[in-house]
Image (spheres, rainbow, N blue to C red):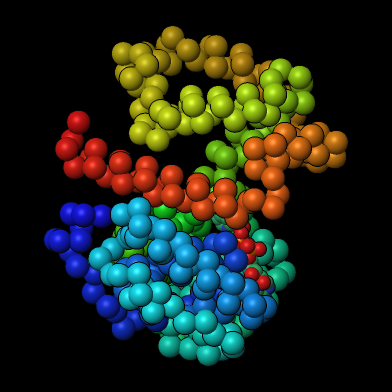
């Protein structure tokens, strides 16, 4: 962004970051670290995935550059040149100060990959999982370097969403957490550090609560899937881009105490009608997919993701500009 470009030139750094798994999240992390000048090694068990991801990343960098949304001050070629595809997990991890595991959400697979990462890590290497919901203790109790392990859960897509959740296991060293917070800030992310682990962490507990209620509303015949989407994107989501739920409540009455006096009974009554947890799937899931595919057919998901990334990057820039003028 313009101010950052002139005032804080991005330095090329010696430290190596290893990314294991080059799907959506691995690719996005690679871009984030590269834009901050780190050397990035990217490995996937399917070599074609690395090749495909590198192509997508170059394309994404050119789009960001064209739209004036490139992160940091390095040019497209410099950022892209920081990322190297690797053929071997051991080679990828050796010498890395930070290893970001980004393989599919499967406990046994992640445990196996992390065990291998652990074997190639040095005493200084921080080992991180991008898991969306698996407890850090379940992923790391078997590791030799478990004091160096934590979950760093990004918001998708990490290259244009700032918030990352840092979730320690009971044995994560305080120094590991401090180093993780510093590195996340150094690459321009906003770390939120949990005091202790809980299933789904914070972001997904909130996201799943919204998903569960959205699904119940459609299942109960109260609203169409499109209506639910609009309620969030044109309604609540616009406010939440600037204020969290407590700040919103604080402003919607004469402070949060007054909000509770006015609305706590109503909120409790509505909550009591939420109903039991529901397993999503079957005919209703098919119906929702058909409705979503009217706007974004399955073979156009890639294009829709790129549009989402461009819009989110533009929103991030807009918010930064607003903060700079302190409205
Ligand atoms: N997609 C999201 O919205 C999102 C958001 C935040 C966190 N996450 C988490 O990030 C992780 C990755 O998700 P994703 O959406 O990028 O998945 P993905 O399926 O797009 O990518 C996973 C990649 O890992 C590779 N892989 C599988 N086994 C491997 C192995 N043994 N060694 C190396 N690579 C291997 C696959 O070939 C694939 O390229 C998951 O834990 C997910 O829960 C996802």
* Location of residue 1 with respect to 82 vertically, above or below: above
Left or right of residue 24: residue 6: left
Seen from the viewer's position, the closer of residues 274 and 289 is 289
Residue furthest toward the front? 66
Question: Residue visible at 63% across and 73% down?
Answer: 49
Q: Position of residue 48 (x, y in %)?
A: 64, 77
Q: Give the left or right position of residue 17, taking residue 207 as reference.
A: left
- Residue plotted at (40% across, 63% down): 62
Residue in view at x 31 percent, y 46 percent: 317
The quadrant in which the N terminus is found is bottom left
Q: Position of residue 179 (x, y in %)?
A: 34, 68
Q: State the image coordinates of residue 315 (x, y, percent, origin top left).
A: 37, 42
| Ligand 1 - quadrant of the structure image | bottom right
From the image, which quarter does the C terminus lie in?
top left
- The one nearer the camera, 212 or 52, is 52
> In the picture shown, does residue 189 fall above or below 32?
above
Rendered location of residue 199, percent (x, y): 61, 50
Left or right of 272 on screen, residue 230: left
Q: Name the residue located 70 percent from the left edge and 24 percent from the top edge.
A: 224
Numbered-mark total: 0
Query: Residue 33, can we see it?
Result: yes
Look at the image and tell me whether residue 150 can be seen: no
User: Is 145 in front, or is 233?
Assistant: 233
Q: Hey, which residue is sitting farthest left in the picture?
A: 7
Q: Classify 195 as above or below 117.
A: above
Q: Which residue lies most toward the right here?
A: 283
């Amino acid at each position: 962004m313009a101010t950052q470009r002139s005032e804080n030139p991005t330095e090329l750094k010696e430290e190596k970051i290893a990314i294991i798994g080059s799907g959506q999240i691995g690719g996005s992390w690679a871009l984030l670290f590269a834009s901050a000048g780190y050397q990035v090694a990217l490995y996937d068990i399917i070599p074609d995935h690395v090749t495909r991801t590198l192509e997508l990343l170059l394309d994404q960098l050119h789009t960001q550059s064209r739209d004036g949304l490139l992160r940091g001050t390095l040019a497209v070629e410099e950022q892209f040149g920081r990322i190297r595809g690797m053929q071997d997990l051991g080679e990828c991890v050796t010498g890395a100060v930070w290893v970001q595991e980004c393989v599919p959400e499967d406990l046994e697979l992640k445990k196996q990959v992390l065990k291998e990462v652990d074997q190639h890590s040095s005493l200084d290497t921080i080992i991180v999982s991008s898991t969306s919901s698996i407890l850090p203790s379940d992923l790391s109790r078997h590791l030799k370097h478990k004091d160096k392990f934590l979950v760093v859960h990004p918001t998708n897509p990490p290259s244009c969403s700032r918030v990352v959740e840092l979730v320690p296991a009971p044995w994560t060293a305080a120094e590991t957490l401090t180093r993780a917070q510093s590195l996340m800030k150094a690459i321009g992310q906003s770390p939120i550090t949990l005091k202790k682990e809980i299933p789904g962490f914070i972001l997904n507990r909130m996201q799943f609560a919204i998903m569960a209620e959205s699904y119940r509303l459609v299942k109960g015949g109260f609203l169409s899937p499109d209506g639910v989407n609009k309620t969030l994107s044109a309604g609540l989501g616009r406010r939440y881009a600037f204020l969290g739920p407590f700040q919103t409540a604080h402003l919607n009455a004469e402070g949060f105490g007054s909000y509770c006096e006015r609305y706590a009974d109503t909120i409790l009554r509505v909550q009591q009608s939420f109903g039991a947890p529901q397993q999503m799937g079957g005919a209703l899931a098919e119906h929702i997919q058909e409705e979503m595919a009217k706007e974004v057919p399955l073979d156009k998901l890639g294009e829709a993701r790129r549009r989402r990334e461009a819009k989110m990057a533009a929103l991030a820039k807009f918010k930064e500009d607003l903060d700079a003028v302190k409205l």
